[in-house]
Amino acid sequence: QEERDAVQVGDRITRSHAHTLAGSTVAGMRTIDWVDGVIEIIDQTALPGETTVLRLSTVDELIDAVRRLAVRGAPALGVAGAFGVALAVSTQPDPTRAIEAVATARPTAVNLARGVRRAAARVPEGFDAVLAEAERIRDEEIASSVAMAKRGADLVRELCGERPKLLTHCNTGALAAVEIGTALGVVLELAERQQLAGVIASETRPLLQGARLTAWELRRAGVPYRVAVDGAGPFLMARGEVDAVILGADRICANHDVINKIGTYSHALGARAAGIPFIVVAPESTVDEETPSGADVEIEERGAAEVAGDLPAANPAFDVTPASLVTAIVTESRVIRP
Ligand code: MRU
């Protein structure tokens, strides 16, 4: 435990780390990076019990990691897609099919296909150009996180006043965004400014990104938090235990409908009923002007076994929150008030 806590999430993984970490249990690195010709990720399926680094050296390994949510969260998926193109170019004489397979590994977060497209546009210039583009996307995401944290914290203060109690859903921290995060970056910024009373992490059934990943990040950052079952959100809001909902997005449509982890829509309805702000924090790389509305987005349907063992199940991984329920969308460059 001590060793794990010695290294903070967000620290740059070094080459020597990579070799001592591989397949073992130390925390504290970028969620995803390109190291010595392969993609390195923190295996998010193993958290919070174990902090394991995976080295992905083939496109098939990357696609498997994306599908199992070993790497996840919209900004991190964009970076994964771009590094995936670098992997395809470095391992295959004709990378076209492999590149397409990476772009479609998961359908809902716009960042994945977008990251792939940006890096793929550099393929004619060769591997170095592809890798440079992928690293640019990674660095842009980190810079966006820094800017969103400040802008979002200012907005929360404007909308909620002193030391609000917040509720967040899924995981939007460093694990989802290379470093820092989107909505959780705002939470951390508020905590650092001593302007936060506490956070409720909605557990996020069925894969528990809230209870496993957000709680892990908040604990490590020393931010006071409680985990609540997803269904408790609207009631906690009604009872005055939440001053605002703050969460991320996988895609923001042209009409400002917000696609995010299943359960987001319920929290938005709860926030509207309780009369509290519902704030979305996401980089411009998640804003998709080409998709008119939520009805046009493919919602990933995952296996029934994630929900209820052998029982038949409905398992949409995301939902659509209509723009009319959204108080504000914070990006690195603007605040949109639908
Ligand atoms: O299925 P996941 O875990 O990839 O879903 C992630 C989310 O829904 C996040 O809220 C979203 O990507 C924002 S990440 C900063």
Image (cartoon, helix red, strand yellow):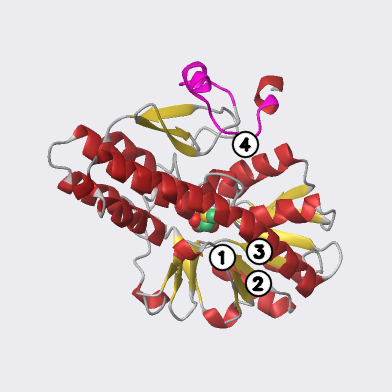
Q: Is residue 20 above or below residue 154?
A: above
Q: CA distance from mark 1 to mark 2?
A: 10 Å
Label 3 crowding class (10 Å Cα cut-off): few <14, some 14-19, many 20+?
A: many
Q: Is the C-beta of the residue carrying label 1 under 8 Å from the nearest atom of ligand 1?
A: yes
Q: Secondary structure at mark 3?
A: strand
Residue 246's label in the rendered image is 3
* Upstream in sequence: badge 2 or badge 4: 4
Where residue 253 sits in the image (x, y, percent)? 43, 74
Q: Is the C-beta of the residue carrying label 2 under 8 Å from the nearest atom of ligand 1?
A: no
Residue 9's label in the rendered image is 4
Where residue 186 sits in the image (x, y, percent)? 68, 57
- Tag 1: residue type? Thr
Find out whether residue 13 is within the magenta segment. yes
Judge left or right: residue 121 versus residue 108.
left
- Tag 3: residue type? Ile
* Upstream in sequence: badge 3 or badge 1: 3
- Tag 4: residue type? Val
Q: CA distance from mark 3 to mark 4?
A: 21 Å
Going by the picture, which residue comes out furthest to the left? 94
Magenta segment boundaries in residue numbering = 6-26
Q: Is residue 227 above or below residue 42?
A: below
